[in-house]
Amino acid sequence: MLPKGLLKEYSHLISILVRFVDIVMVFAAGWAAYFIRFQKLTLSTDYLVAMMMGVLVTPFIFSFFSIYVSLRGQHFFSHVIRLLEAIIGIAFVLAGLAFFTKTGAQYSRIWFTWWMVLTAMGFVCVRCGIILLLRVMRAHGFNERRVVIIGANELGVKLAKTAQQALWTGFRIVSFLDEQDKLVTFLQSIPVHPMPPALADYLRDKRIDEVWVALSLQDEARVKAIIFELRHLTITIRFALDIFGLDLFNHSLTEVAGIPVLNIRATPMTGVNRLVKAIEDRTLAILALILVSPLCFFITLGIKLTSKGPVLFKQARLGWDGRVITIYKFRTMIVHHEASHTVTQATIRDKRVTWFGRWLRRFSLDELPQLVNVLQGRMSMVGPRPHALPHNELYKDMIHTYMQRHRVKPGITGWAQVNGWRGETDTMLKMEKRVEYDLYYINNWSFAFDLKIMFLTCCYGLINKNAY
């Protein structure tokens, strides 16, 4: 049987081995790409030099993108996305070197593309295998981290419950420690002990790897005393912030002028994320417009033949950062006028909807002109659906997190829509659920999440019982 402390004991050797395997994979991918392009196994000198440059820059790029940090507790998809970003970084560095040294013409672009594609495929497959293997091992008690929680309170229980539910993280809660006398001896099936007089000796005897401090921010003196007492130990100490009761939005820890701060509300669309989202939107919008342009022609013809009025319906709605934007849709109703600052939602047998418009709504084809909004930069392919201005005024005071939807650009489709929360919002529950799913999307945004939503939209989201 594999000793349970083996991975921990030889972690430094495993780290070196992982880096060596990474280098071998980069070289092997370049060699395989060379064979695919030229049907030769013997490398020319120029290509050998290029591959050696790839081998040299890989460890630095991977370190920059935090590829070599511990996988414990990381989300599977976030690691894969970061890995792909690192490989794109390698491609840019190598392309930049070729440009500045004026050697780009010596290399086949097909070979270079194959090299990067095979590198990405190899790394993703290997890392996925490693992550899955570690998760299985940790779920069975191997490669675990023994943890003591200081603070037998609500926050401590939440931490313990989270660790127990996520066995794949490998955190094993050994006990709670608390200075106050407790009437209970167990919480979450974990023993509760009084704070030992010699905390460092207790942790050493129990072979504890980490201490999680679940105390209030007001207990600064106790926290300082714990840190001082454990100053001679090399174990990890984590301080858990009691922020569960706060209304958090894409929260994260950062620094402002060297001072650590907690972002309670911040948009995720900054820096690289904003660039990735913009490239994703523009690229997919152009491709989609090319594909659906023949369909749009026939839809335009159908609208003109079945009812009088313009082809497009334009309406002011709230966009990113609360800015008013104009969105486009294919007109599905007869031309009519409503009172100022009033918008009546379409109902299941709405007489204003034409028979052709009902067909368009059924298959969500009336939304296609919003691809132009995406190209304009006003909307995104994926994001919270924009609502009419009167609806924003109505719901922003009824649902206190409602306006947080506008921290990102509105989308043609979204997480709420593919989960069935679309169409008429005739009850408060429907709007609350829509907002809940929208905020989940924003807090968990990633390129992979966008791809998942678009895939689900193509499979299930275009036809919905609430689309009328």
Image (tube, helix red, strand yellow):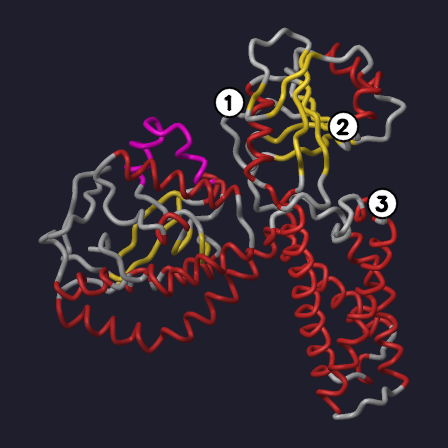
Numbered circles on residues, count: 3
Q: Residue furthest front?
A: 1
Closer to viewer: mark 1 or mark 2: 2
3D distance between C-alphas at marks 1 and 2? 23 Å
Q: Amino acid at mark 3?
A: Glu
Q: Which residues are magenta?
A: 389-406
Task: Tell me which label, 3 or 1, sits earlier in the chain.
Answer: 3
Q: Is residue 358 left or right of residue 397?
A: left
Q: Which mark is residue 237?
A: 2
Rendered location of residue 154, percent (x, y): 55, 19
Determine contact: label 2, label 3, CB under 8 Å: no
Q: Which mark is residue 310?
A: none
3D distance between C-alphas at marks 2 and 3? 20 Å
Q: Mark 2: which secondary structure?
A: strand
3D distance between C-alphas at marks 3 and 1? 39 Å
Which of the two residues, 113 or 274, is positioned nearer the viewer here? 113
Considering only vertical position in the picture, is 32 above or below 429?
below
Determine contact: label 3, label 1, CB under 8 Å: no
Residue named by callout 3: 9
Q: Amino acid at mark 2?
A: Ile
Q: Mark 3: which secondary structure?
A: helix
10 Å neighbourhood of mark 3: few (<14), some, or many (≥20)? few
Residue named by callout 1: 245
Q: Amino acid at mark 1?
A: Gly
Considering only vertical position in the picture, is 182 above or below 148?
above
Task: Tell me which label, 2 or 3, sits earlier in the chain.
Answer: 3
The residue sitting at 84% across, 57% down in the picture is: 60
Q: Is residue 299 magenta?
A: no
10 Å neighbourhood of mark 2: few (<14), some, or many (≥20)? some
Rendered location of residue 256, percent (x, y): 72, 30
